[in-house]
Image (cartoon, coloured by chain):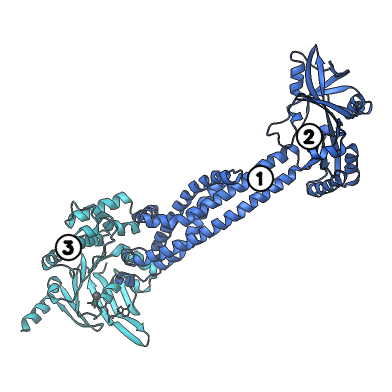
Chain colours: A cyan, B blue
């Protein structure tokens, strides 16, 4: 067993818009340790979401290799990538992305059904997680009947229901007030403490404070990778 | 696919349709009318021919029945004397039919004379049916007890009779009629046999004499003893008429020749009988007529069904395409959570199939309700065949497949990242 959860080498992701090439990612080399808490920081359009989608096997690189948990996923086809997502990835999105016609429990169950887990077992697991993220008593509400923070808790429970190896959060607190933001970050922290590998994407440096390492992106390139200590020192140095 | 997932996808389809009940219902209408029309079409197709088929089965497909008809009053006066009416088919007609029209196997005449039959001092009116021994070859009538008329009976003009079942029972309630003598008018006839039951069903195509009391005797014996003039007393009035043959069955050698022979017979008789004092009944023609009527209904309903299914199918495809677009985000979410293209594809396809199947089931109800209505207005017999009910879900699923495949394929083909970004 290696200690590496994800290794990206020479990753490029280009978009062709007629004559122009948009280099959303332009040569990324990155290694994420198991159990690591990594933050990806960058301005809007710097390629954070593109990188996260690649890490989540939702997208494929134009160039480069990506080894996830010991498996080269850059050569997999669409079906195989779906299976990797199903087994190893948990996504949390800025806009929650819950399915509106499903209840809280049903939303949390969705990943399990694509794994073929029996309904009873799925329901139990979903209820357990809903309880854990503090949604007790709201199992049968629809997303529209919940507050933003509650919705994001549902999304977190859903991201955790398949026991993912990698938890990916894209601006997970972008739509929340600061109090709720703190709650969600605390929850993420807790998960990390329990051994979860977490990658958090944000454009807000303040939100990287809990990460062990911070990677800064600009124009699809890695500008810097700093550990917590280096970050703190850099902050102190800055006026 | 995993069975839990399959069930889940089915449930999802049902749920999604229940979410927009009115939309789903409107969406189903095309299938509903289409399937209903198909069922009604088959019911009418089956039913319209059924009665005629039964008739043909009973009378035989190669039979043509000729009957003498008493001409109407004004026609009578032209050729009849004040006291005697002469009309109907003649022996000459029958000879000409069997002699000049090819494909005619045999012509069996029946001459009817109503006579008083005396039996142990009791009087009953019995129709004597004079015919030839071949009669039993061309009709479903069979002898039950004793024997049928023979060629010798005919040649020698023997005074023998074969009683109809009811007649035997009426005349001989307590004993066997065989070899007994009955008095017909002034003549003694010996009973040689009793017929079996004449078969069930409506009396269409048969004369009332078949149902009334009757006895068969050789035509030769009948003519010998009672002559060709028939004195008839009916409802208090007294009339004398001369009719050679009341009824004749023409047997044709093969089904394809029946209609041509019928045409020849008609031409021949029309020439000899300008008064039209006869009728020609062709069971096979009735069947063809019924089939043609059924065919017209079938075509009309097939058009309705075809158009309904086509328009319904297009409508469903349209709505499903809109649904797919509307739910792009959901597709992206599901893909991110591990759904494969196949999962997405089956989700939308199943949703369409559930919709069309539900439409089909409502269509069955509609299709079962339609034939009685058609019956009411068009006097078309209907009979819904079982296979029509099995066909209905098949059609609905086919329409569902045809209209659902493209939207489902479109849904499955969406790029997950772009679908997630969709507003
Ligand atoms: N489908 C696409 N077609 C063309 N260009 C794209 C596409 N997706 C992303 N891009 C481009 O790639 C670059 C990086 O986009 P990305 O979404 O990764 O940025 P981001 O860092 O997540 O920004 P934000 O903070 O606003 O979410 C942008 O310039 C964007 O316009
Ligand atoms: Mg982004």
Does label 2 lie on the same chain as label 3? Answer: no
Image quadrant holding the N terminus of chain B, namely bottom left
* Residue B34 rendering spot, x and y as whole percentages: 51, 55
Q: Which residue is mark 1?
A: B49
Mark 2 neighbour density, 10 Å: few (under 14) some (14–19) many (20 or more):
some
Residue lying farthest to the bottom in this orientation: A19
Query: Could you tell me if residue B64 is visible in this image?
Result: no
Circle 3 is placed at which residue position? A149
Residue B78 visible within the image:
yes
Q: CA distance from mark 3 to mark 1?
A: 71 Å
Whole-angstrom CA distance, mark 3 to mark 2, is 91 Å
Disc 2 beta carbon < 8 A from ligand 1?
Answer: no
The disc numbered 3 marks a residue on which chain? A
**Residue B406, position as x, y percentages in the image:** 46, 66
User: Subunit of mark 1?
Assistant: B
Question: Is residue A106 found left or right of B140 in the rendered image?
Answer: left
Task: Judge: label 3 CB < 8 Å from ligand 2.
Answer: no
Q: Position of residue B317 (x, y in %)?
A: 45, 63
In the rendered image, the vertical position of residue B179 relative to residue A215, given as above or below: above
Give whichever of A17, B92 is nearer the camera.
Answer: B92
In the rendered image of this protein, does residue A226 appear above or below residue B197?
Answer: below
User: Residue at position x 62%, y 48% from top?
Assistant: B45
Instruction: Give the secondary structure at mark 3.
Output: helix
Q: Which mark is residue B139?
A: 2
* Mark positioned earlier in the residue sequence (1 or 2): 1
* Relative to B34, residue B98 above or below: above
Point out which mark residue B122 bears.
none
Q: Chain of mark 2?
A: B
Position in image of residue B307 (x %, y %): 53, 60
Task: Confirm if mark 1 falls within 8 A of ligand 1.
Answer: no
Few, some or many residues within 10 Å of mark 3 (<14, 14–19, 20+): some
């Amino acid at each position: 067993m290696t200690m590496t959860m994800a290794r990206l080498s020479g990753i490029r992701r280009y978009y062709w818009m007629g004559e122009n090439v948009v280099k959303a990612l332009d040569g990324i080399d990155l290694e994420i340790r198991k159990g690591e808490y990594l933050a990806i920081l960058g301005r809007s359009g710097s390629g954070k979401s593109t990188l996260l989608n690649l890490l989540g096997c939702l997208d494929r690189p134009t160039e480069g290799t990506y080894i996830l948990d010991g498996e080269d996923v850059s050569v997999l086809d669409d079906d195989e990538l779906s299976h990797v997502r199903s087994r190893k990835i948990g996504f949390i999105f800025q806009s929650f992305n819950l399915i509106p016609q499903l209840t809280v429990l049903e939303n949390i169950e969705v990943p399990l059904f694509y794994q073929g887990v029996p309904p009873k077992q799925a329901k139990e697991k979903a209820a357990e997680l809903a309880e854990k993220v503090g949604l007790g008593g709201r199992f049968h509400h629809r997303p529209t009947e919940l507050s933003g923070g509650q919705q994001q808790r549902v999304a977190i429970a859903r991201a955790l229901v398949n026991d993912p190896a990698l938890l990916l959060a894209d601006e997970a607190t972008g739509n929340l007030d600061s109090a709720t933001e703190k709650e969600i970050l605390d929850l993420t922290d807790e998960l990390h403490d329990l051994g979860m590998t977490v990658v958090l994407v944000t454009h807000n440096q303040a939100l990287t404070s809990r990460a062990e390492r911070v990677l800064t992106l600009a124009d699809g390139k890695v500008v810097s990778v700093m550990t917590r200590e280096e970050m703190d020192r850099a902050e102190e140095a800055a006026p | 696919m995993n069975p839990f997932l399959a069930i889940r996808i089915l449930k999802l389809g049902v749920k999604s349709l229940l979410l927009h009940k009115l939309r789903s219902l409107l969406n189903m209408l095309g299938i509903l009318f289409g399937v209903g029309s198909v069922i009604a079409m088959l019911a009418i197709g089956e039913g319209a021919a059924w009665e005629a088929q039964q008739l043909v089965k009973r009378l035989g497909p190669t039979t043509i029945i000729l009957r003498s008809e008493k001409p109407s009053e004004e026609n009578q006066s032209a050729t009849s004397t004040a006291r005697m009416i002469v009309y109907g088919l003649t022996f000459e007609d029958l000879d000409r039919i069997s002699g000049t029209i090819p494909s005619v196997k045999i012509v069996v005449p029946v001459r009817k004379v109503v006579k008083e039959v005396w039996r142990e001092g009791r009087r009953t009116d019995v129709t004597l049916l004079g015919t030839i021994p071949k009669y039993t070859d061309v009709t479903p009538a069979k002898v039950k007890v004793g024997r049928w008329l023979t060629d010798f009976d005919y040649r020698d003009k023997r005074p023998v009779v074969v009683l109809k079942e009811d007649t035997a029972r009426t005349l001989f309630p307590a004993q066997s009629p065989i070899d007994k003598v009955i008095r017909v008018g002034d003549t003694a006839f010996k009973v040689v046999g009793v017929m079996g039951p004449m078969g069930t069903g409506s009396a269409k195509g048969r004369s009332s004499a078949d149902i009334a009391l009757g006895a068969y005797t050789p035509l030769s014996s009948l003519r010998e003893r009672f002559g060709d003039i028939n004195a008839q007393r009916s409802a208090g009035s007294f009339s004398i008429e001369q009719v050679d043959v009341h009824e004749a069955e023409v047997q044709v050698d093969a089904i394809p020749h029946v209609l041509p022979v019928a045409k020849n017979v008609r031409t021949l008789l029309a020439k000899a009988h300008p008064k039209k004092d006869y009728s020609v009944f062709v069971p096979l023609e009735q069947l063809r007529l019924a089939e043609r009527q059924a065919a017209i209904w079938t075509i009309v309903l097939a058009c309705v069904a075809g158009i309904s299914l086509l328009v319904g199918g297009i409508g469903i495809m349209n709505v499903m395409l809109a649904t797919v677009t509307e739910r792009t985000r959901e597709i992206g979410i599901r893909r991110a959570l591990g759904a494969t293209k196949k999962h997405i594809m089956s989700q939308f396809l199943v949703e369409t199939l559930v919709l069309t199947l539900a439409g089909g089931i409502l269509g069955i109800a509609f299709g079962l309700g339609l034939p009685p209505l058609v019956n009411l207005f068009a006097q078309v017999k209907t009979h819904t065949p079982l296979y029509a009910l099995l066909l209905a879900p098949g059609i609905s699923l086919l329409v569902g497949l045809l209209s659902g495949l493209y939207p489902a394929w479109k849904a499955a083909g969406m790029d997950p990242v772009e679908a997630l970004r969709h507003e």
